[in-house]
């Protein structure tokens, strides 16, 4: 019986040390995954501000806006398209209106076309970074400040930035 208890204790100690080691290694592993995938890059803003403008190329940007059917908002870009040089600092605005009689919290999710352009679209300021709370009937203009990285594939001549707002289900 004592031998069985010692074996169980050994297994529990090994499992505890394994869990501690996994928890300890999780943070650097998370940062490595973020670095590889380009998610949550804290240095992206400073990199975007320090790019060189490629005046030899033009890229047409198209802007699109959608809302999920569960969200009672009207959402639109104030400018449908724009020609820019890669590396040029660009600001565009979107307008959103809460058409309900309640305050609502929404979150914008960006998508890009072509998908490979996403890695070269460096946002400095964006309403998509945080949930947006709009009071009943409120209308708001929301800026997006960004740079298209000059390293983007030279065959890409048009990039579409599309946002879809979703209801977060959070009470305002």
Image (spheres, rainbow, N blue to C red):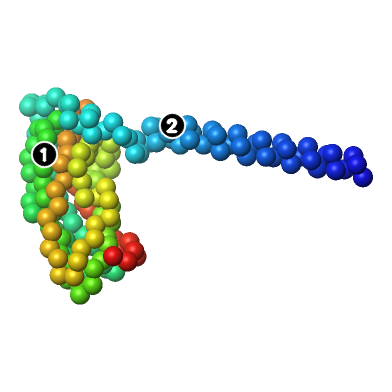
Q: Which image quadrant for residue 106? A: bottom left
Q: Position of residue 18 (x, y in %)?
A: 65, 36
Numbered circle sitting on residue 90? 1
Q: Residues within 10 Å of mark 1 (few under 14, many from 20)?
A: some
Identify the element where label 1 is drawn: strand
Location of residue 26 with respect to 56 vertically, above or below: below
**Which residue is the site of mark 2?**
32
Marks 1 and 2, Cα distance to the nearest angstrom? 30 Å
The residue sitting at the right extreme is 1
User: Are the residues flagged by discs 1 and 2 in contact, CB closer than 8 Å?
Assistant: no
Q: Nearer the viewer, residue 167 or 61?
A: 167
Q: Nearer the viewer, residue 2 or 36?
A: 2
Question: Residue, x 18% and y 70% (percent of image)?
Answer: 136
Q: Which image quadrant for residue 138? A: bottom left
Question: Residue, x 34% and y 65% (percent of image)?
Answer: 169
Q: Residues within 10 Å of mark 2 (few under 14, many from 20)?
A: few
Numbered circle sitting on residue 66? none
């Amino acid at each position: 019986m004592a031998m069985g208890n010692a074996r169980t204790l050994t297994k529990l100690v090994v499992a505890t040390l394994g869990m501690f080691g996994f928890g300890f290694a999780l943070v650097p592993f998370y940062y490595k995954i973020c670095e590889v995938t380009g998610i949550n890059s804290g240095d992206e803003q400073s990199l975007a501000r320090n790019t060189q403008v490629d005046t030899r190329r033009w890229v047409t940007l198209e802007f699109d806006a959608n809302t999920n059917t569960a969200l009672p908002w009207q959402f639109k870009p104030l400018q449908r398209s724009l020609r820019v040089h890669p590396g040029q600092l660009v600001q565009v605005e979107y307008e959103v209106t809460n058409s309900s009689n309640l305050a609502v919290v929404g979150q914008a999710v960006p998508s890009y076309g072509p998908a490979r352009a996403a890695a070269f679209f460096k946002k400095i300021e964006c309403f998509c970074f945080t949930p947006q709370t709009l009071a009943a009937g409120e209308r708001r203009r929301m800026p997006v400040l960004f740079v298209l990285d000059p390293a983007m594939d030279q065959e890409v001549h048009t990039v579409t930035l599309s946002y879809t707002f979703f209801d977060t289900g959070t009470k305002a």
